[in-house]
Amino acid sequence: MDFTVCWFRRDLRLYDNAAFYHALRAASKAGANCVAFFCFDREILDRLPDRADRRVEFIWQSIQEMTETLKKHHSGIVVRYGKASEAVPAFLAQLAQKGKILSIHTNHDYEPRRIKRDKHIREYCTGAGIPFFSYKDHVIFEKEEVLTKAGTPQRVYTPYKNAWYMKLDENKSFFLKAYPTLEKFSNALAPIQSLPESSPYNTLHDIGFEPTDLQLKGGTAEGQKLFTEFLARIDRYGELRDWPAKKGVSTLSTHLRFGTLSIRELVGTALARDSAGAKKWVDELVWREFYNAILHFFPKTQQHAFRPEFESVEWNDPDQDTAVAAQFAAWCEGRTGYPIVDAAVRQLNQTGFMHNRLRMITASFLTKDLHIHWKQGERYFARKLLDYDLSQNLGGWQWSASTGADGQPYFRIFNPVSQGQKWDPEGTFVRQYCPELGKLPDKYIHCPWEASLSVQVEANCTIGKDYPFPIVDHDRERLIALERFKKASKNGRAV
């Protein structure tokens, strides 16, 4: 018996999947059996600080859905729990005892650590005589596919976007074409009785984790449901996307992060709408690919500023100063005294999601009002975000900190009060996550310290007791941030 293998990672769907298509097609052509494989990678999971991690539950739910779908085709997925660098070779060695492995197929992972992992597995496969193939699937365009006319990496979003659309228009039907999988090659699936045994994964406890309060469910079916709901309002995306209390954004980022939905399907469907709102949403998906390219070409941005002159910005260090540590803790816990910032961080802590406008506001507050290095915030988001993606998180944080590619100019600093008043004027969002402010009049919802004591008493919210006073004065900290960035900008120049 001969086999091909599809190794699933951040592509947890059985439809329109490049690697799965190639693995099935190769098996069909050779009269072999295609084996689906997934590894709960301890090299990633052991780093997580909390055994109740919503992302792990999302992944687990997605694998459960894939298992049930493959069962309907009298097949299954081999699941292992262990360090991928050890578990993948062990699985391949075990499968090789059942028959010849003709090839292993997977989709590209772009994070530096994962690239190192894949290099290790590829070397093992070469030594074992197993051809190893990897494909583009997570994005429409990657790596060197979108460059300047001079053949160099794009460093600014708008030229990148223009080149991206130009590239797409060269052959839209090809770039957005779906890969047929089970609808064409289901007969190539390995019979369930031929599969090696899986590690236990019937419950989260089997892989050392606990159930969470996950609200956004995993799996393709749930993703498709959300996408269908979003299509009913996509034409108004441009109008609604900045309002955290309104249903304006797609909430599909987690499904894109873990590949339960196809980026080709989403882009193709949106562009077919031919509306300003749908086009604006695709523009936001292009930001995703821009940041993916930035990490590819400039991996140093994991630790260092994209713009080297801002590497020397003076930051307050919570690891060295107890007062700064207290401010950082207040930011992490949503008790800075600025309601829009606190509500946003509480939303993150309670749900694993944060609205994109609020990501910018909270990141600006940490870096420009508290003067804490963007890496501190990036790491915190990495712990909490359901849709955490290294390239997107780095790109977003460096944008807000004014240190990144096409970042926010350092002299444009978000005012947390006016931002709240503009995008949550009635305080609907703030009241949801800061219920102690719930009875304050709209006039004071974003500046509760300005309410008179009698107003506070009537609202049953005494500032300094039920809700904190602002931990810093924004106007003062804004001037300090400007001075620090001006000083740093004199010491170097942009990349």
Image (cartoon, rainbow, N blue to C red):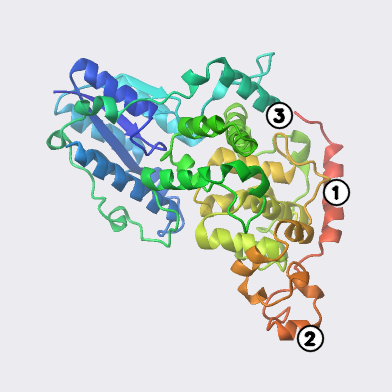
Comparing marks 1 and 2, which lies closer to the viewer? Answer: 2
Q: Nearer the viewer, residue 471 or 97?
A: 471
Comparing marks 1 and 3, which lies closer to the viewer? Answer: 3
Q: Which mark is residue 158?
A: 3
Instruction: Give the labeled residue for mark 1.
Output: 482
Residue 33 picture location, percent across and down: 19, 26
Disc 3 residue type (three-letter): Thr
Where is residue 427, by image quadrant? Answer: bottom right
Mark toward the start of the polypeptide (1 vs 2): 2
Instruction: Give the labeled residue for mark 2.
Output: 454
Residue 22 picture location, percent across and down: 33, 22
Identify the residue at image location x=17%, y=35%: 195
Q: Judge whether 478 appears above or below 301 on screen.
A: below
User: SS at mark 1?
Assistant: helix
Q: Nearer the viewer, residue 73 or 301?
A: 73
Quarter holding the N terminus is top left
* 405 left or right of 180 in image: right
* 488 left or right of 255 in image: right
